[in-house]
Image: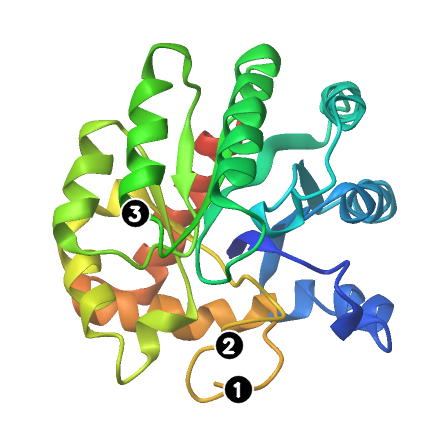
Amino acid sequence: MIFDTHAHYDDEAFDADRESLLAGMAKQGVGYIVNVAAGIESARATLALTENYPFIYGAVGVHPQETENLREEDMQWLKEKAKQPKVVAIGEIGLDYYWPEPDKAIQKKWFIRQLSLATQTGLPVIIHSRDAAQDTLAILKDWQQDKTAGVIHCFSYTKEMAREYLAMDYYFGIGGVLTFKNGKKLVEAAEYIPMDRILLETDCPYLAPEPYRGKRNQSGYIDYVAQRLSEIKGITKEEVLAKAMQNAKDFYRIL
């Protein structure tokens, strides 16, 4: 059974067929999905999905690219919504330096503020880090004394960076990039990361695996990622899916 630990079914890419697609997840072997918010409106939509689908859980938080106009009132709203029983994480939060805006100082401010939100709620964190390896690591090391569990979503850094996060007991979100021909760096990291620290994810509608690369991603496609990971780890696909399922339940504290 598949546990998609990071999806965005509130995205407009699913507006035309969201209901029918989600209704067919069980037939594709998908048992659990965590829909991860990217901003305040996205969090509202995520909460609605958790109410409408028994197998969907939610994470609430603000993506670094959406932090420009954040206010403290938004943090209080997120804190309140984080109390809902099917909200299982704060995320996705972090740093993204791929684009020049928002300013790095703004991103850092709200990243640190949302980490404090995780401390207050006791929920695990879903970390987005793009072209910001050193700053992300430095902030998370400073947060260590207060931290809950954390996952580096869509891990894309080196084996050496993976070592740093393993020393801090982090999990690693691995998805479709593992199947790409130019995904050598991630393959090396996946070889190194212990299986009990790996969470499988789609980041759908983005980052669909081969043979669907460039098309809309969805949770059923995790099967292709599990197959590739089984080849890297030298175990069966079924063993990969079973271990990843248990990892996800442990991380999100889902019985």
Quarter-of-image position of residue 77: top right
Q: Note whether 128 is above or below 73 in the view shown.
A: below
Judging depth in this view, the residue of 115 and 196 nearest the camera is 115
Judging depth in this view, the residue of 108 and 121 nearest the camera is 108
Residue drawn where x is 26% and y is 42% of the image = 134
Amino acid marked by disc 1 = Gly
Residue 208 numbered mark, or none: 2
Residue drawn where x is 44% and y is 20% of the image = 148
How is this picture coloured? Answer: rainbow
Q: Note whether 153 is above or below 22 in the view shown.
A: above
Quarter-of-image position of residue 217: bottom right
Position of residue 21 measured from the top left corner of the image (x, y, whole percent): 76, 72
Residue drawn where x is 38% and y is 69% of the image = 225
Amino acid marked by disc 2 = Ala
Earlier along the polypeptide chain: callout 1 or callout 3? 3
Mark toward the viewer: 2 or 3:
3
Q: Can I make out residue 255 in this image?
A: no
* Real-space CA distance between mark 1 and mark 3, rounded to the nearest whole angstrom: 26 Å
Q: Dot 3 corresponds to which residue?
A: 133
Amino acid marked by disc 3 = Ala
Position of residue 235 measured from the top left corner of the image (x, y, whole percent): 20, 62
Residue 94 numbered mark, or none: none
Q: Can I make out residue 126 in this image?
A: yes
Mark toward the viewer: 1 or 3:
3
In-image side of 137 versus 85 (left or right)? left
Q: Dot 1 corresponds to which residue?
A: 214
- Badge 2 vs badge 1, beta-carbon distance below 8 Å: yes
